[in-house]
Amino acid sequence: REAVVSTQSTGEPMDKKALEKKQIKEKKWLRMKEQWEKSRREPEELRTRIWKGCPDSLRGHIWPLMLRIREIKRENEKINGPNIYEVRNHTIINTLKQAYSALIPL
């Protein structure tokens, strides 16, 4: 038998062949991520790769690309102006700084 070299996300041991397969899959996804605009124009390859599954290690990077989060955010800022929550948080932080500096003079 092959030696155990890593563990799966479930905590179970992963043999060498499964680890190599996982690494190949991650390399393919990384290549696709680097050339995302081209990949979006070739939907069949993207669809096939999505069907096979996105590696856990890359999901946080791939899902926002697939959902077009940045483009939608930019479009919404053009329509609605800056994000209300970011403006509100900035205002709250400034208010707290002013109150804190008034309480504790330097």
Image (spheres, rainbow, N blue to C red):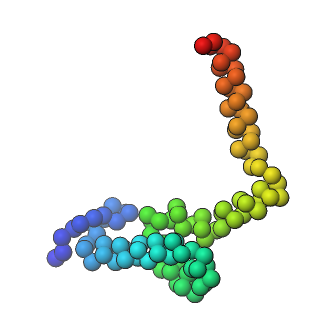
Return the x and y of residue 1 as percentages of the image width and height. 16, 76
Q: 92 or 56, which is in the foreground?
A: 92
- Residue at image x 30%, y 75%? 20
- For this view, does 63 lie left or right of residue 81? left
Instruction: State whether residue 70 appears in this view.
Output: yes
Is 52 situated above or below 68? below
Residue lying at 53% horizontally and 63% vertically, measured from the top left: 61
Q: Position of residue 69 (x, y in %)?
A: 66, 63
- Tell me what residue is drawn at x 77 percent, y 56 percent: 77
In the rendered view, does 33 fall on the left or right side of 10?
Answer: right
Q: How many marks?
A: 0
Q: Residue furthest left?
A: 1
Residue found farthest to the right: 79
| Quadrant holding the C terminus | top right
Q: Is residue 91 left or right of residue 19?
A: right
Q: For this rendering, which residue is in front, 31 or 84?
A: 31
Q: Residue furthest front?
A: 106
- What percent of the width, then of the height, locates residue 21? 34, 77
Residue at image point 70% right, 30% down: 94
| Residue 50 picture location, percent across and down | 53, 78
Task: Give the image quarter of residue 75.
Answer: bottom right
Asked which quadrant contains residue 57, the reply is bottom left
Question: Please, is residue 65 above or below residue 87 in the view?
Answer: below
